[in-house]
Image (cartoon, grey):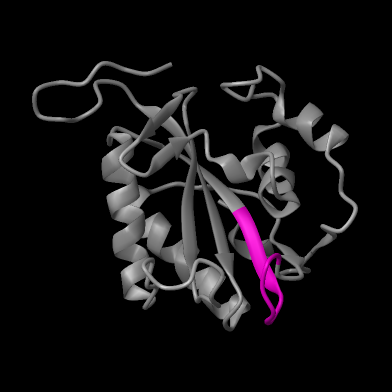
Amino acid sequence: MWASLSNAGAVSDMARVYVGIGSNIEPGVHVRKGIASLRHRFGRLQLSTVYESKPVGLDGDNFYNLVVGFDTDLTPKSVVSALRAIEVRFERKRHACQHAPRKVDLDLLLYDDLILKQDGLELPHGDITRYAFVLCPLAEIAGDIRHPVSGQRFAELWRRFEKKGQEIWPVGSLLEAKRT
């Protein structure tokens, strides 16, 4: 549910947010550092399993991907600004080729059940239903939540997802001791 905005631009209630994390440059190192940066900025995180996949749409090293969930009182725009600031610390250049290798890629996937398409921000993020490396970890930690547009639960969307050509597999023990 979209909470009303105050004059100061802060959301009056806490929102549940889900963010996709990806890396294919020293991904074991940078995924851990990305999670630490998110934890430092947003506090307690709910973490999915980390999955490895071959790159989609480019040649290069395999990616590690996961989804994290957290609660925030920031507006969607402020969350995205915070994510971009973290990416900059990892030398991510968003204006460069979209399919370029990256140390850390952070995408706001969901902001409660908000539906928004404004100023380059699309919620829910279109990659949720497009890529296994986004939908699988999201369904793992938010399986009972409904997609704001289709109304289907993410677990059901994952069950019906055409996985052919988008194989992913769990990365063993990357985060085992650091799941919360």
Q: Residue at x 38, y 41 (%)?
A: 121
In the image, is 129 to the left or to the right of 41? right
Q: Nearer the viewer, residue 38 or 76?
A: 76
Measured as percent of width and height from the top left, residue 36 is found at 44, 64
Measured as percent of width and height from the top left, residue 165 is found at 87, 58
Q: Which residues are magenta?
A: 56-66
In the image, is 156 to the left or to the right of 18? right
Quarter placement of the N terminus: top left
Above or below for 162 versus 32: above
Q: Quadrant of residue 173?
A: bottom right
Q: Residue at x 76, y 66 (%)?
A: 53
Magenta span: predominant SS is loop
The residue furthest left is 7
The residue furthest right is 164
Q: Quadrant of residue 84?
A: bottom left
Q: Residue at x 34, y 64 (%)?
A: 86
Q: Residue at x 46, y 24 (%)?
A: 115
Above or below for 155 versus 133: above
Please tell me how many numbered marks the rendered image carries. Answer: 0
